[in-house]
Image (spheres, grey):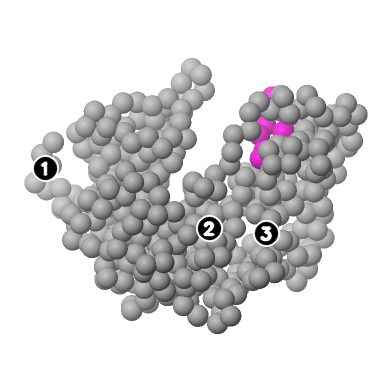
Amino acid sequence: MTMPADLDNDAAALRGAMLKGIAGTGSQVVAPAWQVIAERVPRHAFVPGFYLPADERDERGLTVWEPVTADIDYGRWLASAYSDTTLITQLDGEEADWENPVVRHGGAPTSSSTLPSLVLRMWSDADITEGHTVLEIGTGTGYSTALACERLGSSHVTSVEVDPDRLELAAGALYGCGYTPTLARADGLYGYWPEAWFDRIVAACSFRTVPSVLLRQTRPGGKVLLPLSGWLYGSARVLLTVAEDGTAEGPLLPGTISFMSARTHAAPAYGNPADWAAGLPEVPRSGRHAPERLTADTEEAFHLRFLAQSAVPNTQMVTIDGILHLIDVVSGSAATLTPDGGTWSVREGGPLKLWAGIEQVIDAFDAAGRPGPETYTLHVGSDGQRLLHSSMPQLSLAQW
């Protein structure tokens, strides 16, 4: 498709409206310098094609993913590119043929262009100033990389991406816009030694634990901003400052923000939950806490899932027909919670009592007054990774 002659003007108007809306939310999380930078970076150049979910699921209950390109619907494509929305660019690790895209039924997003307000918030939270060298983990579409290049200059930016197809597309978009950062196909779990040391490391994917190599690639006094998440899908973000001795410490940041997992940290398949439940003891016990403490659509439940992962780091959770299943493929442990007249019947089996471990974390959380994420500090050292709070026992992340 030949783009309309007024594409740049249309894009600039929509971009300005999007950024005005972000600034008008009343939140002061986006630093003014990044707001100005975003005025100059054309997001549409990095998303030539993407998927949007249809309003309704199909007859099997699967999400219907509709492809959006300028050829299919120019107006929808450009308006979506300048909406404060995450745009899914890849499903199940498979690249689409954006010249002849098709509707997809079901599938797990594996790459995306993160909503601009969150990208700007991440760069703002990383406390970056001119002159800093930056490693970005997760190039994705390249839009976030372009923002860093516009602020710092391309020579100060390194970005790594594990997916070669994603990296090739991002490189084309970046170079087409005049940005020339160092790009490499690499697993962000290991950082990127050829360009170390860095003043800042910022990840656009989540890890189950802080990769120690990232601390070794950061200058003393430098900072590492990482999303953390586990297989219960509880997430947090941490801003660590690296000390001279290589240890690091920093606060969890407020908010309920989640990112796709680094592919090497993604949860494994657990099979059929009914198979796990079949081996559990017949006689249940009464649960002290309802599963809604973890599953509710609230900020507290989101935060509590993150804390619970310290007790059961290899556990996954799924609800089928009203029964909550907990499955640990590493230890072979499992548990079910079944509603029983206003209470919950708990059946647990295997080396670990999964719900009992979670209940202990909930007990400590309640006794401490249900503190929010910003009241916790993460310490990373030779003795492991420990989440510290003045009113709660230490939670160890070392086994992640």
Q: Measured from the top left, where is residue 326 in percent x and y?
A: 72, 37
Along the line of sight, which residue is nearer the eye, 243 or 15?
243
Query: Residue at the spot x=57%, y=56% of the render?
Result: 228
Of mark 2 and mark 1, the one earlier in the sequence is 1
Q: Secondary structure at mark 1?
A: loop
In the displayed structure, does residue 274 sit left or right of residue 39? Answer: right
Mark sitting on residue 239: none
For marks 2 and 1, give the one nearer the viewer.
2
Is residue 323 covered in magenta? yes
Mark sitting on residue 397: 3
Mark sitting on residue 227: 2
In which quadrant of the rendered view does residue 53 lie? top left
Q: Is residue 385 above or below residue 273?
A: below
In the displayed structure, does residue 255 sit left or right of residue 74? Answer: right
Of mark 1 and mark 3, the one earlier in the sequence is 1
Query: Residue at the spot x=59%, y=34% of the render?
Result: 269
Answer yes or no: is residue 28 visible: no
Of mark 3 and mark 2, the one earlier in the sequence is 2
Along the line of sight, which residue is nearer the eye, 311 or 46?
311
Q: Secondary structure at mark 2?
A: strand
Q: Measured from the top left, where is residue 138 in percent x and y?
A: 40, 54
Query: Residue at the spot x=73%, y=29% of the render?
Result: 276
Q: Quadrant of the N terminus?
A: top left
State how far apart marks 1 and 3 are (Cα): 53 Å
Q: Which amino acid lies under the numbered mark 3 shown in the image of this protein?
A: Leu
Q: Measured from the top left, where is residue 217 in percent x and y?
A: 46, 71
Q: Which residues are magenta?
A: 316-325
Q: Secondary structure at mark 3?
A: loop
Is residue 295 covered in magenta? no
Q: Which residue is mark 1?
A: 4
